[in-house]
Amino acid sequence: MTLRKFHLLLLAPLLVNSASFAANPQKPAISEIAAGLLSIKIDGMQDLPISGLKMVKTGEQTVFISSNGRFALYGGKLMDIWTKQEIKELPDIDKIANRIDLSRMKLNVDDLGPVTIGHGKTSVLVFIDPRCPYCGNVMKDLQALQDQYTFKLVMVPILGPESQNIVVQLACQLGANDAKLKDAVRDRLLKQDYAGLPTEPPGQCNKEPLQKAVVTAKLFGLQGVPFLIAPDGRTHSGAPEVLADWLANKPHEVAQTTAPVTPKPEKKP
């Protein structure tokens, strides 16, 4: 599934039944606006010459939607569709727009085939590539925090064919429902030791969790790894200088010392 097709599938259920907007001339409540955006029939869509914005036409209504389907401009209001909240003030950018509230999105992280480390009360989502050195730094640091947090490591292959093979092989082992295999996958990731993995694609494998992981990474606008989502929704691209401080949101914590690893541009023939 391409990202464009995914956007269409995403927006279709988000925009159904625009009649509820047109039929009520009174100023609707924010919750009603969000609910209406969940039920409009799309008559057409066209990319605008503006980065990351689409113009959606539905009957007599016009809605501007961000490319990932998260933000919508309708009737002079900017809505976060994922959380059904209106963004009105500058502080809302940090409280709403700059965070990913997984609980409001009703995203089941376990559907992404994660490797779980730790047993803390709050969860941290971490997107990694198995071959990324900065991901290795994060995985090393998180081992000292297993009593405080539960880390969900989601593999996405962004560093080329070798990473893709490793991710597929490990994802297939995770899907085998074998406790020993799952422990072996966790150990391989933490040590970044992938010696002896097959190079041929597995004969039988449920790749659905991996596919969902890749689509979710694109939905979140992930440009590189590691990419972290804290329990309070804050995001971080790259390895935090001090992982424990960033998770605790300490004021003195500053930008990362290591930039995220990003995919190399493909060579044109």
Image (cartoon, rainbow, N blue to C red):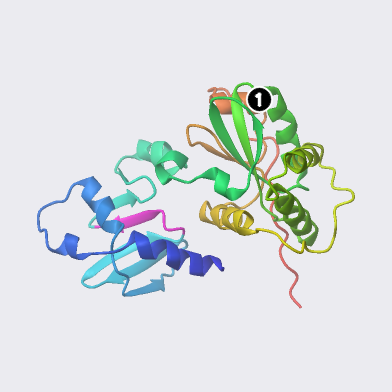
* Image quarter of residue 63: bottom left
Magenta stretch holds residue 72: yes
Q: Toward the viewer: 107 or 133? A: 107
Q: Residue furthest right?
A: 196
Q: Residue at x 36, y 39 (%)?
A: 92
Q: Quadrant of the N terminus?
A: bottom right
Q: Is residue 84 left or right of residue 228?
A: left
The residue under label 1 is: 146
Is residue 167 something one can see in this rendering?
Answer: yes
What amino acid does circle 1 point to?
Gln
* Image quarter of residue 157: bottom right
Q: Toward the viewer: 11 or 78? A: 11
Is residue 50 something one can see in this rendering?
Answer: no
Q: Position of residue 48 (x, y in %)?
A: 41, 70
Q: Position of residue 142 (x, y in %)?
A: 68, 29
Tell me the magenta residue range: 68-74
Q: Residue at x 18, y 65 (%)?
A: 19
Q: Position of residue 46 (x, y in %)?
A: 40, 73
Query: In the rendered view, would you say 53 is above or below 235?
Result: below
